[in-house]
Image (tube, rainbow, N blue to C red):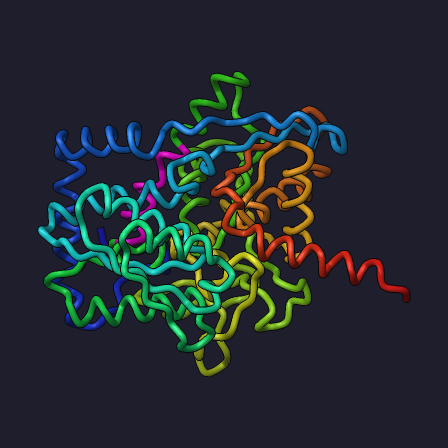
Amino acid sequence: MNGHFGEHGGQFVAETLVGPLEQLWETYQQAREDSSFEAELQDLLARFVGRPTPITRLRRLGIEEYGVTLWLKREDLTHTGAHKINNAIGQALLAHRLGKRRIIAETGAGQHGVAVAAACAHLGLDATIYMGRVDAERQAPNLQRMKLLGAEVHLVDAGTATLKDAVNEAIRDWIAHPDSTHYLLGSVVGPHPFPTIVRDFQSVIGREARAQFLDAVGQLPEAVVACVGGGSNSIGVFSGFLDDEVRLVGVQAAGDGSGRMGHHAAPLLYGEPGILQGMRTYLLQDDDGQVLLTHSIAPGLDYPGVGPQHSHLKDIGRVEYTTCSDDEALAAFQLLSRAEGIVPALESAHAVAGALRLAPELPRGSQVLVNLSGRGDKDLTSALAAIALREEHIDEPA
């Protein structure tokens, strides 16, 4: 295993980290072949995380407009409220095997930070979380939860003070303390073996969803839709359907919808291959290779790169990648809440919006599965403020 997905992936890191990465890969391979590790992981997923999560058939949204039935894979119903806990609990178990009690992590929307803090509290590990100050301000409830769970939280003011900058600070910490610290990376990004390890821990989503859909409907869905930031929830659900004749649609953040650099976070649509944070992948960069600014109303999607497996799936045409604007995500946020009684994370609202845009293209009677990666408690303040501002603009006289 060389850590490449086609032309993407690899391991572009400081020499200090080569040894810890090799140790992590060896330990991971041994763990997955150890029945006791697998048994402990499955027990924690069932009794701590709350798996399996159900699939929910929507009763109104999609059917009334297009005659297409939407289903949600309910990762919002996990302990801590998002898919991030699947990977956090798996890597925390790996850290025990590595003999490393200090865990560091980055977080954007805060869900990964909360998941890491919860996993570390449950397993008796020390957690240090890096979070951009901008993200901390718009995700205050998750910042409070991390601290309550015992994590030490460092707010990052460098750069745009968002996810990319939190990752940079976490990597600097890891470089300084490679022997005592495990970096519990939260998405399918970074140097090998992180994209593979995180994908494998998140693949439980796709395995469950495929079996549940066959059991409930008797056939596979026509399409599976998920939002894509770094890309762990989407790789998780897509992995269950890659070998099937099912359309796979990944939705990135279009931001204000203008397509202008600095106003979106859609490297798979507007980026070029380059090196970012230890991997080769599509990223938003200028002609000199400098990483560009991004924007999304959803902090978990506000990232200039993407997991290398997504880049490969784009290159081979297996997954269709599209975008959703802030306004479309806010509309989906309201629609799902009011029509179905389910409040999605703003990240997940992008996937819902993508599914509603896809629906008119499909024959009536089609079935579409949407990965609802997280719940929207964390987004209520920022989303409701944005909705109110949007409605003010609509009501303003021309």
User: Is residue 354 on the magenta stretch?
Assistant: no
Q: Is residue 354 above or below residue 68?
A: below
Residue 210 visible: yes
In the image, what residue occupies the spot 33% across and 64% down? 130
In the image, residue 53 lies at what x, y percent? 42, 29
Q: Percent x, y for residue 52? A: 38, 27
The C terminus lies in which quarter of the figure? bottom right
* Residue stretch in magenta: 194-206
Image coordinates of residue 22 in percent, x first then y, are 14, 57
**Residue 312 visible in the picture:** no
Q: Say which residue appears at 33% left-offset and 34% top-offset.
A: 49
Q: Residue at the location (40% across, 55% down)?
A: 144
As for residue 195 lying within the magenta part, the answer is yes
Residue 6 occupies quadrant: bottom left
Side (left or right) of 115 relative to 370: left
The percent position of residue 60, horizontal first and vertical second, equals 70, 28
